[in-house]
């Protein structure tokens, strides 16, 4: 299985901050990397697919980059509704695997 | 707008079979173009993919389930099902159904709200 490792595991930031979360795959997954966020008691929501494509309806302050094994999710200016847990997921092959999550908290 | 809704017993006894269904509305599961998946999230933990199925093909499963899982589609009811046999406390989790476009590399774009299943005697 492909192992996905996110960093940091938790992050404190303020409204308006620029935030970057990284995700590393244990092998080359080309650009088949997706980002989700999840709020307590809710299902994950797709933000970015194939590393850098913005899902329809997702604000443009979210962006993704990377290829191969190293990927980043950037939020350009944090909004109150962005405080959540963020997950990366590889869709290169079965079994699909997720990172352990990054908990983004209000400072 | 596609909507998915999981349902099933919230409590299952150890060694029994966990059975869940996911009702799909706003689109037909037999129209093609999409795979239908089950995922789970252990309490306070990350996400685990269980498996997926296409309306006209065989399901794919995560080997971590050790052949305990069965995913099926009921096109007459427009729903998918998950059976997980010989459950233990380690199967306690929130179970989600989700949709993925037809390519293996596509993301999960629609999710159900999830249903908590507790395995306990």
Image (cartoon, coloured by chain):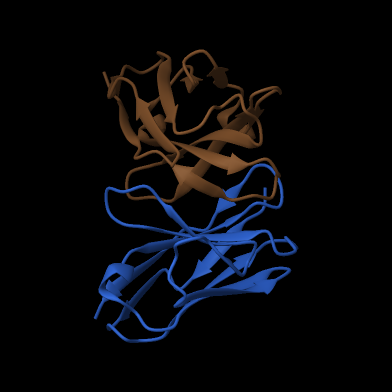
Q: Position of residue A51 (x, y in %)?
A: 63, 66
Q: Nearer the viewer, residue B120 or B48?
A: B48
What quarter of the picture does the C terminus of chain B occupy? Answer: top left
Residue at 60% x, 24% y: name it.
B30
Q: Position of residue B68 (x, y in %)?
A: 55, 21
Relative to B14, residue B91 above or below: below
Quadrant of residue B117 within the rendered picture: top left
Quadrant of residue A32 within the rendered picture: bottom right
Relative to B91, residue B75 above or below: above
Relative to A46, residue B30 above or below: above
Horizontally, residue A5 falls left or right of residue B87, namely right
What quarter of the picture does the N terminus of chain B occupy? Answer: top left
The chain shown in blue is which? A
Q: Position of residue A95 (x, y in %)?
A: 65, 42
Q: How many marks?
A: 0
Q: Nearer the viewer, residue A39 or B28?
A: B28
> Residue placed farthest to the bottom in the image?
A17
Residue at 56% x, 19% y: name it.
B72
Residue at 73% x, 68% y: name it.
A68
Horizontally, residue B100 falls left or right of residue A9, namely right
Q: Position of residue B74 (x, y in %)?
A: 53, 15
Horizontally, residue B86 falls left or right of residue A97, namely left
The chain shown in brown is which? B
């Amino acid at each position: 299985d492909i192992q996905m490792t996110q960093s940091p595991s938790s992050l404190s930031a303020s409204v308006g901050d620029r935030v970057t979360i990284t995700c590393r795959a244990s092998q080359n997954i080309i650009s088949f990397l997706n980002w989700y966020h999840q709020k307590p008691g809710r299902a994950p929501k797709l933000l970015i697919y194939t590393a850098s494509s913005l899902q329809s309806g997702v604000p443009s302050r979210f962006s993704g980059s990377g290829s191969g094994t190293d990927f980043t999710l950037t939020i350009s200016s944090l909004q109150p509704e962005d405080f959540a847990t963020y997950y990366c997921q590889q869709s290169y092959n079965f079994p699909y695997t997720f990172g352990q999550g990054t908990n983004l908290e209000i400072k | 707008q596609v909507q998915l809704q999981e349902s099933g017993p919230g409590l299952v006894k150890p060694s029994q079979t966990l059975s869940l269904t996911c009702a799909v509305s706003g689109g037909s599961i037999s129209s093609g173009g999409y795979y239908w998946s089950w995922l789970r999230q252990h309490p306070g933990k990350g996400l685990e993919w269980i498996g997926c199925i296409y309306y006209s093909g065989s399901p794919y499963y995560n080997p971590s389930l050790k052949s305990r899982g069965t995913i099926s589609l009921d096109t007459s009811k427009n729903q998918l099902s998950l059976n997980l046999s010989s459950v233990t406390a380690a199967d306690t989790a929130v179970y989600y159904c989700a949709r993925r476009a037809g390519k293996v590399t596509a993301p999960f774009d629609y999710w159900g709200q999830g249903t908590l299943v507790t395995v306990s005697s």
